[in-house]
Amino acid sequence: MNGNVMVRHPRHAKFFFSTLAVAVAVIPTSAALAAPIAGLAPYQRPVDAPVIQKFEHPPTWNERALHGITEPVPASFKWLQDQGAWYTPFNLPGMPGYYDLRGWHSPPVKPPVKNER
């Protein structure tokens, strides 16, 4: 084999792969610029963004939101009536085990059975 071919090959490979890396990095960026990007104007809501006119809680929403909270419901939970359609972690199960204060991950407790005599 010719020694010059062996020396030039790595240089050509470096050029090829560096050019390929730049092309791969630039192509998705230019394609993404055509779509709206969140964060360019965080103070302004996009014109075509959907708007919720009225939100009604499903029938089971309060039951789910108050899971693990005993009656009477404390007055500090009044904010649940004003909870709109936005995300809240309050009506979703959290971490299991020691941190499961509201019993989302444990089986439901059955009421004691009365012995009638």
Image (tube, helix red, strand yellow):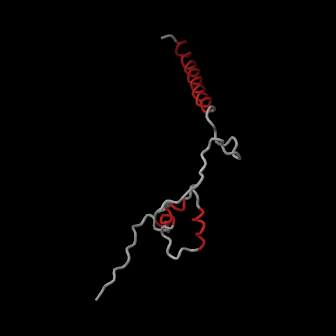
Q: Position of residue 112 (x, y in %)?
A: 36, 79
Of 77 and 21, nearer the camera is 77
Tally the numbered discs.
Answer: 0
Q: Nearer the viewer, residue 44 or 18?
A: 44
Of residues 108 and 101, which is closer to you in this image? 108
Residue placed farthest to the left in the image?
A: 117
Q: Residue furthest top?
A: 2
Q: Position of residue 89 (x, y in %)?
A: 54, 59
Residue found farthest to the bottom: 117
Residue at 53% x, 13% y is 5
Snapshot quadrant of residue 24: top right
Residue 62 vertical position relative to residue 49 in the rendered view, above or below: below
Q: Is residue 33 left or right of residue 109?
A: right
Is the residue 9 above or below the residue 39 in the image?
above
Q: Residue shown at 55%/12% (left/top)? A: 4
Of 1 and 82, the residue lying toward us: 82
* Residue at image point 52% right, 16% down: 6
Residue at 31% x, 85% y is 115
Q: Position of residue 41 (x, y in %)?
A: 70, 42
Q: Give the answer, above or below, for where 32 lies relative to 110.
A: above
When asked about the image quadrant of residue 34, the answer is top right
Q: Quadrant of the C terminus?
A: bottom left
